[in-house]
Image (cartoon, rainbow, N blue to C red):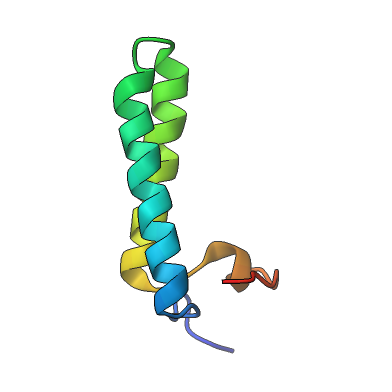
């Protein structure tokens, strides 16, 4: 059995997840005017994607789903 949070994505996947996380965080900054729930969802999603990119780990890949990047 492999260790939990073992890096499972390469540089390309890390860059894509990092940029997507930053985009979601920017959306959370704009979305607070529309809805507090929208802001919270975007904020949590953005922080999680940035965490994935910094760690080099993908939750979908850890669950067995193959991603293209």
Q: Position of residue 3 (x, y in %)?
A: 47, 84
- Where is 42 relative to 46, above or below? above
Q: Image point 38% across, 49% down: which residue?
A: 21
Quarter of the figure with the C terminus: bottom right
Q: Image point 37% across, 42% down: which residue?
A: 23
Residue 48 in sight:
no
12 vs 65, left or right, is left
Residue 29 in sight:
yes
30 vs 12, left or right, is left
Q: Nearer the viewer, residue 64 or 66?
A: 66
Quarter of the figure with the N terminus: bottom right
Q: Position of residue 17 (x, y in %)?
A: 43, 59
Q: Position of residue 54 (x, y in %)?
A: 31, 67
- Where is 16 relative to 56, above or below? above
How many badges with numbers are in the image?
A: 0
Quarter of the rendering containing residue 30: top left
Q: Image point 40% across, 27% down: which residue?
A: 40
Q: Image point 39% across, 74% down: which residue?
A: 56
Quarter of the rendering containing residue 19: bottom left
Query: In the image as oriented, which residue stretches furthest toward the right?
Result: 65
Quarter of the rendering containing residue 11: bottom left
Q: Nearer the viewer, residue 30 or 57?
A: 30
């Amino acid at each position: 059995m492999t260790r939990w949070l073992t890096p499972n994505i390469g540089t390309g996947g890390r860059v894509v997840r990092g940029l997507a996380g930053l985009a979601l965080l920017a959306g959370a900054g704009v979305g607070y005017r529309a809805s507090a729930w929208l802001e919270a969802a975007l904020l949590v999603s953005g922080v999680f994607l940035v965490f994935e990119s910094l760690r080099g780990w993908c939750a979908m890949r850890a669950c067995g789903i193959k991603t293209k990047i």
